[in-house]
Image: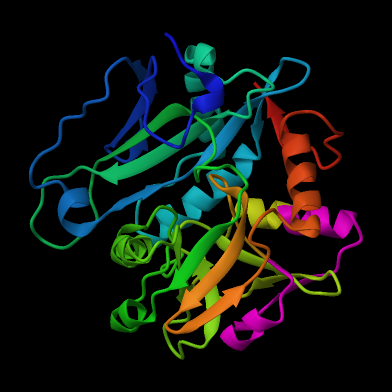
Amino acid sequence: MNIEWTKLGFEFLPTKSNIRFTYENGKWGEGCLHNDYKIELSVASNCMHYGQAAFEGLKAFSCKDRKVRIFRPEENARRLNSSLRHLLMPEIPEATFIDAVKTVIRDNIEYVPPYGTGGSLYIRPVVVGTSPQIGISASETYEFIVMVVPVGPYYKGGIKPVEAMIVDDIDRAAPCGTGHTKVAGNYAASLLPSKIAKKHGCAVALFLDSKTHSFIEEFGTSNFMAITPDGRYVTPESPSILPSITNKSLMTIAEDLGIAVERRPVPETELTTFAEVGACGTAVVITPVAKIHHGDKVYAYNTETMGPVLKKLYDRVTGIQYGEIPDTHHWMMEL
C-alpha cells in the first residue's frame, strides 16, 4: 500500500475488505467480511428495475491522540432506517449498523488517513433489494453492505470557494434535489442538472422547490446554508430536503457560539442579501460558495476565501472530528 495521504481526493479506492449481511426469511443474517468488490445479482433484481436501494455516508477520523473515532454513526443508522421504512425495506438494528461500521474499520485500519493529513475514512453503507421479480412489489431478499474508502476534500482545492448554478429548466421537468423523497442516497435525478452545471463551469447544481420554483432547497451534493450580514445562520426548512447530519451538527455548534439559527423557507430573492453562502454535508463538510448563477443573474459572495463565520464553524466541527477541541456533545464514537 502506497497512498499519498495529503493528495487524496473524493474518489473510489479499493481497500482490504467490505462487510455484507443478507436478509432472507424475514431476518438479517450474520455479517461476513469480503476481500473482493463484486456481488452477484439476478438481472431481474428488484434494485435494478424498481430502485429499492438506499445508502448512507459517514466518516471516521484519526484524532490528535491517535485514536480512531466515528462522527455520529447512530444518526446515520437512524436516517438509513427512515429511508428503508419509506422504501418498504427491512430496517437495520442500530446496534448491528454500528457493529458493522466498527468491524469494517478495524479490518481496514491501515487505510484511515493519519492525523494531520486532512483526510478521513469515508464509510458507505448501502442496502439493495435482490429478489428477482417483474411485478412491482417490495423485494423479499436484501443485501446490506458497508465499504470504506480513504478520502480527502470532495471538491478540488479544499475549502476554496466554488460556483453553483440553479438549473431551473430541468427542475421544472421533475424534482431533482437529492432529498425530494427524503431517501438517503437517492441521487440519480440530480445527475443531469449536475452535468449541466459543470458544463457551465460550476461545481454543483442548486435546486429550487418543485412547486413554486421560488424557494431555495438544497445543492446536488449537500444542504444549503448562509450567513446574514448581522451574523445569523440561515438554512432552508422543507419536507423535501435530505436531513443533513452535518447541518444539524453545525446548527448546534452555531448556537454554542452564540450565533442565532433560522431554519425556515428561504426565497431565491434573499440570495442578494447574504454575506456568506456554503454547502454542507458529510463529504463536503463546509464548502464556501463564491457565486450562484441563475440564467442572466449572478449572486456573488466572497470569491477568494471562506468567510469568517463559515470558517469559525468549519474550524469548530473539524476540531471536534479530529479531537483537537473538546467534544462536549459526545458526537465522536471511539472505535
Residue 72 in picture, x, y percent from top left:
66, 40
Residue that appears at 41% across and 31% down: 146
Residue 178 in picture, x, y percent from top left:
42, 63
Residue that appears at 89% across and 55% down: 257
Residue 22 in picture, x, y percent from top left:
30, 32
Applied colour scheme: rainbow
Q: Is residue 306 left or right of residue 256?
A: left
Quadrant of the rendered image containing residue 86:
bottom left
Residue that appears at 28% across and 53% down: 52
Q: Residue furthest bottom?
A: 212
Q: Is residue 251 highlighted in magenta?
A: yes
Q: Is residue 146 visible?
A: yes
Q: Is residue 171 left or right of residue 69?
A: left
Quadrant of the rendered image containing residue 195:
bottom left
Placement of the N terminus among the 4 image quadrants: top left
Q: Is residue 303 left or right of residue 179?
A: right
Residue that appears at 51% across and 26% down: 7
In the foreground, 171 or 102: 171
Q: Residue furthest right?
A: 258
Placement of the C terminus among the 4 image quadrants: top right
Q: How many marks?
A: 0
The magenta region covers 250-276
Q: Is residue 95 left or right of residue 263?
A: left
Q: Is residue 43 highlighted in magenta?
A: no
